[in-house]
Each structure stands twice: as C-alpha cells, then as structure tokens.
Image (cartoon, grey):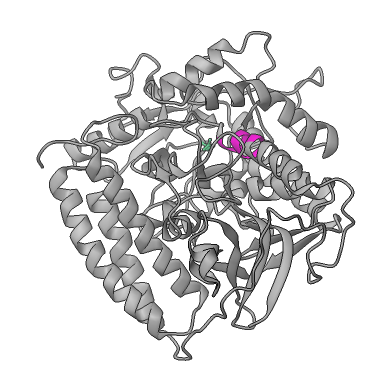
C-alpha cells in the first residue's frame, strides 16, 4: 500500500472545502483536496438563490430571522458568529479577492433579493446560478495555487485514527485522534493511505438517501458516516430540510426551482389555482421552508393531486427570462414555459441541518478531525435553516477552521512542496504513524445489487422518514435499514472497493443515523415533524 503525506487532507471540494483549502494554502500549508468528480460537481454549484450579505449597521433582524426560521432552536453563539463574520468573509474572498460577478443595480450597487423567512432584501446573487458563479471563481483560483493538489476521482473510504489503524499498542489507548484517511483512486482502483496532520470533512449533504432530492448524485452523508465509524459526536440529524419547490414531472428529473422566485413575487397555488399558504402563515408563500414544504405535503395528501404549482404571473416575462435563466431553461427542457404557465412543484430533500458536531472553529470531538459546511453542525440552523445561509456558512466555517489549523500547525513560513513529498514542519503534537496496510478482496461487486439496495434505501427513507414521520413508520424504516446494512456490510467485506460500494455503505449508515435521531426525538420542531399514529 502506498502512503502519501500532506498537511491538510480536505475531503470534498464544494465551497466549504475549497475555501478552506485556499485559506490554508495562503499560509503555506500543503493541501490535498479530494473530489469525486470535477471541481464543480458539488451541491454548492447547484445553489441557485444567493448568499446573504447584510451590511446594515444593526443586523439584529437577521439574527431574529435565523432564530425564527429555526423555530427558536439555533445555537446563539453560532448565529452570532455568522451574522458578525459573514459580511467580512464575503467581502474578503468573493468581492475583493476573486471579484465574483454578482448582479448589480443601475447605480452599480449590489442587487439584493429576498427568500422565504427573510424580513428584508439582503441576498446577493448572480442571476439564478449563484453557487456556480462562486464555485467557478474559487475553483479557478485553486487551480493556480501551487500548494493545493487537486485529487479528482479520489474517494475517502475510511478515516485513519490512532485507535483503529496502527499496530502500536500505545496508540490504541491514546485519545481519539485522526491522522488522515484510506482513499480510493477510482481511476486505478488502488487504495492508499493519505496521512495528514489535519483532516477536514467537507463532503456536503445527505439528500440522496431520499428518493427525491435536490442534491448531487452521491450526496449520501459520507462525512457523517465516516465520522460515526470513528466515534465522533453527531448531532441534530433528524433535521433534514425539504425544499418546497422542486420541479415535478413524471419521468423527468427533480431539480431545484429557486426560492428567490418567491422573493420576487412567485406564489404557491394548488391545482385549482388557490393560494393555500396565505391562510397558514403571515408570510404566505414566503414562510420558512419547513412550513411551506409541510403545507404542500398536506395539501397533496388531502387532495390526491401529484403536485402543487408556482405561479409566476405577477412577474413580467422579460424579467423572468433575464433574472432566472437556469430555471427557464431547465423547465423548457421538460416542456414547461415558465413565462406562460405555472411550474409544477413538489418538496424534496435539500439540506441536512444536523451533522458532525463541531465548535465554531470546525473542531469535532476527534482530535485533528474537522468538519466544515453542510457536513458540520455548529447548531447554526437548529431545526430548520434560513434560506441563503448555506453558502455563507461554508465561507465562515472554512475561514475559522483554517485559521485555527494554521495556528496549530504553524502555517506561515512553510515552503510549498510537491504533494507526494514527506511532511514538512512536523511538530511533536502531530503524531503521524505508519498506518496498517489496506487489505481488500479482489471480487467485483454486482452493480445490479448495488442499484437495487440503494433504491430500497431511498424509497424507505422517503416513505417512512420523510416530511412527516410517525413512530410506526420510523420503526419500520429502522427494521428495513438494519437488515439492509447487514447485507451491505457482508457485500462490502467480500468485494473490491469501488465508488458505488463506498456510497452504498455510507448511505445505509447515514440513513440509519437519521432514523435513529428521528426516533429519539418525539417533539415536532422545524423540519422534524412527527405525528403520533398514521
Ligand atoms: C434556493 O435557491 O432556493 C436554494 C438556496 C438555499 O438552499 O439556500
């Protein structure tokens, strides 16, 4: 088994992982940045709406909006950090350093939009492809930063810890400490050890454990599952946010229809054209996401209709075409002209408010293991996330985590070095032992079994652990998933490791963790809704 060394191993190259890499690299640290596919294949790339940029002298109203959206459950310290540090993080990296092309008004100022749960216009955007515009700029900068090695097609299989992966008995009894990961190079099929002083989980969300999701394929909570296996604390996993407006058409893919459309006047209606949100929340169609998603779910259950609609008739066609080109084009691909007809929509799994527990500098409960962005949970979102906080959270958590790591590793002054070279500047508190070799069987897994298992898992989660849960449904989900996990484990132990197998193994573990968290929490709050009997 080949062993490589780096300062920081970043698992996932969405906005959080990439921003972390840029910050750490600037201080001279050597970074290995893993991504399954190309640099833009990340949930951040698909974020349409925008990013909060609230520079008002008194951002108290933003604090209140985050709390209100979370149903009063957000961690005050995490909210305070985001509100205080957010504008600086956006200005420093996106506006000043990368010059990201956000939309401007006639006077040249940043154009502000609004989304559900927001009491004012405070979201900057780049038409309806904000995530793509931001991530493209960040990725381009990464590609010209010498001490970041982009490892495309590499998948983390398991974290390395002193307790689990060395032959030294003293290590076994040391405090839980991470020192890198076993990684699979999908091109060669080779597994090797990537030993790191700091390992950063930036694997994004877990939406793909549900049948319908806005997430990229493969978003099955890799970081959550890997962290669980080494004993890290996980928190709030029952709070899975369902986005209310996701395109619906039989035999067509689900895709996000940005909430910014509602910020600009779009209204949710039922099949008869009736505005049912107005009676349910003072903000009507602009209520927080959990409220809107549940209302649509209930409306569909009551009427038997397959979908609700987003009525854009309050907006001029030219404005829609200019401001929302992605939604216009994607809907047109499936025969819907959004300038003339309402968009058929349903809710779908969108964002994990819970995750790997961290403090406000990305520290998990395992030494030298960090988590950032959606993978992490500081409690910022509590039981339900306010729209357009996710990209901002990526920037803030990346900055503070990198800053803490730089201080710990002793970043400044370390010379860039080739990614495969021996570690530089090693200090005694970074004990980087030789990991046990990876031993893997040589049989190929049957792809049909993998596909079938994933489908069963996704439909189980959708039907029994989705928008509305009940103890009975959760018990059934747990039973099915436990059996499935047994199957998948023996499958995993007997077959050559592949991307698909890693995904399936992590998916079933994440699904069980979500179901377990949901079963332990009988109280409906935010996006966790439990009814007694169904
Ligand atoms: C959207 O544009 O509706 C999604 C943005 C977000 O999740 O905050």
Vertical arrangement, residue 151 with respect to residue 74, above or below: below
Name the chief secondary structure element in magenta. Answer: helix
Q: How many marks?
A: 0
Between 112 and 151, the residue placed more toward the observer is 151
Residue 255: x, y in percent?
Answer: 48, 49
Relative to 137, 505 lies left or right: left
Residue 296: x, y in percent?
Answer: 30, 34
Between 254 and 430, the residue placed more toward the observer is 430
Q: Which residue is at the far bottom?
A: 442
**Residue in the image at 57% along x and 50% along y:** 367
Vertical arrangement, residue 367 with respect to residue 342, above or below: below
* Segment tinted magenta in the rendering: 390-396
- Examine the image and state in which quarter residue 154 appears: bottom right
Q: Which residue is at the far front?
A: 170
Vertical arrangement, residue 270 with respect to residue 264, above or below: below
**Residue in the image at 61% along x and 13% along y:** 59
Between 152 and 249, the residue placed more toward the observer is 152
Between 220 and 302, the residue placed more toward the observer is 220
Relative to 473, 13 lies left or right: right
Relative to 195, 226 lies left or right: left
User: Does any portion of residue 158 appear in the rendered image?
Assistant: no
User: Does any portion of residue 34 appear in the rendered image?
Assistant: yes
**Quadrant the N terminus occupies:** bottom right
Relative to 16, 208 lies left or right: left
Residue 432: x, y in percent?
Answer: 66, 64
Residue 238: x, y in percent?
Answer: 33, 42
Q: Is residue 392 magenta?
A: yes
Q: Which residue is at the far left?
A: 533
Q: Is residue 204 magenta?
A: no
């Amino acid at each position: 088994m080949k062993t490589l060394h780096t300062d920081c191993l970043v698992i996932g190259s969405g906005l959080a992982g990439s921003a972390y890499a840029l910050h750490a690299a600037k201080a001279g640290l050597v970074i290995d940045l893993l991504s399954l596919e190309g640099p833009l294949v990340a949930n951040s790339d698909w974020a349409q709406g925008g990013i909060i940029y609230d520079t008002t002298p008194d951002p108290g109203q933003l604090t209140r909006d985050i709390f209100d959206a979370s149903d009063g459950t957000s961690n005050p310290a995490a909210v305070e950090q985001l509100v205080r540090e957010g504008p600086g993080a956006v200005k420093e990296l996106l506006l000043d350093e990368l010059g990201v092309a956000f939309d401007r008004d006639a006077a040249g100022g940043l154009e502000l939009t609004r989304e559900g749960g927001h009491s004012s216009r405070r979201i900057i955007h780049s038409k309806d492809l904000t995530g793509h515009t931001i991530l493209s700029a960040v990725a381009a900068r990464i590609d010209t930063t010498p001490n970041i090695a982009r490892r495309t097609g590499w998948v983390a299989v398991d974290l390395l810890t002193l307790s689990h992966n060395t032959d030294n008995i003293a290590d076994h009894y040391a405090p839980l400490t991470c020192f890198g990961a076993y990684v699979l190079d999908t091109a060669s099929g080779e597994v090797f050890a990537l030993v790191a002083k700091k390992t950063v989980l930036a694997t994004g969300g877990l939406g793909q454990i549900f049948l319908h999701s806005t997430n990229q394929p493969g978003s099955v909570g890799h970081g959550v599952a890997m962290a669980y296996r080494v004993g890290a604390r996980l928190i709030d996993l029952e709070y899975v946010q369902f986005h209310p407006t996701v395109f619906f058409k039989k035999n067509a893919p689900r895709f996000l229809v940005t909430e910014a459309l509602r910020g600009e006047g779009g209204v949710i209606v039922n099949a008869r054209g009736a505005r049912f949100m107005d009676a349910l929340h003072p903000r009507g169609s602009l209520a927080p996401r959990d409220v809107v998603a549940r209302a649509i779910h209930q409306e569909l259950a009551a009427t038997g209709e397959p979908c609700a609609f987003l009525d854009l008739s309050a907006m001029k066609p030219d404005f829609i075409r200019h401001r929302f080109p992605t939604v216009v084009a994607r809907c047109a691909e499936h025969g819907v002209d959004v300038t003339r007809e309402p968009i058929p929509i349903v809710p779908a799994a969108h964002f994990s408010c819970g995750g790997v527990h961290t403090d406000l500098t990305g520290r998990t409960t395992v030494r030298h293991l960090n988590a950032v962005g959606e993978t992490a949970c500081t409690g910022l979102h509590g039981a339900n996330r306010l729209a357009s906080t996710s990209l901002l959270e990526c920037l803030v958590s990346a900055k503070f985590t990198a800053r803490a790591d730089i201080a710990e590793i002793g970043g400044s002054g370390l010379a860039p070095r080739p990614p495969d070279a021996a570690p530089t500047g090693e200090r005694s508190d970074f004990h980087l032992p030789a990991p046990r070799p990876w031993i893997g069987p040589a049989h190929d897994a049957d792809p049909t079994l993998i596909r079938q298992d994933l489908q069963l898992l996704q439909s189980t989660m959708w039907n029994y652990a989705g928008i509305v849960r009940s103890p009975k449904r959760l018990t059934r989900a747990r039973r099915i998933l436990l059996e499935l996990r047994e199957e998948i484990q023996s499958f995993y132990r007997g077959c050559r490791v592949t991307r698909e197998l890693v995904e399936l193994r992590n998916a079933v573990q994440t699904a069980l963790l979500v179901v377990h968290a949901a079963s332990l929490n009988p109280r409906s709050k935010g996006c966790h809704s439990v009814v007694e009997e169904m």
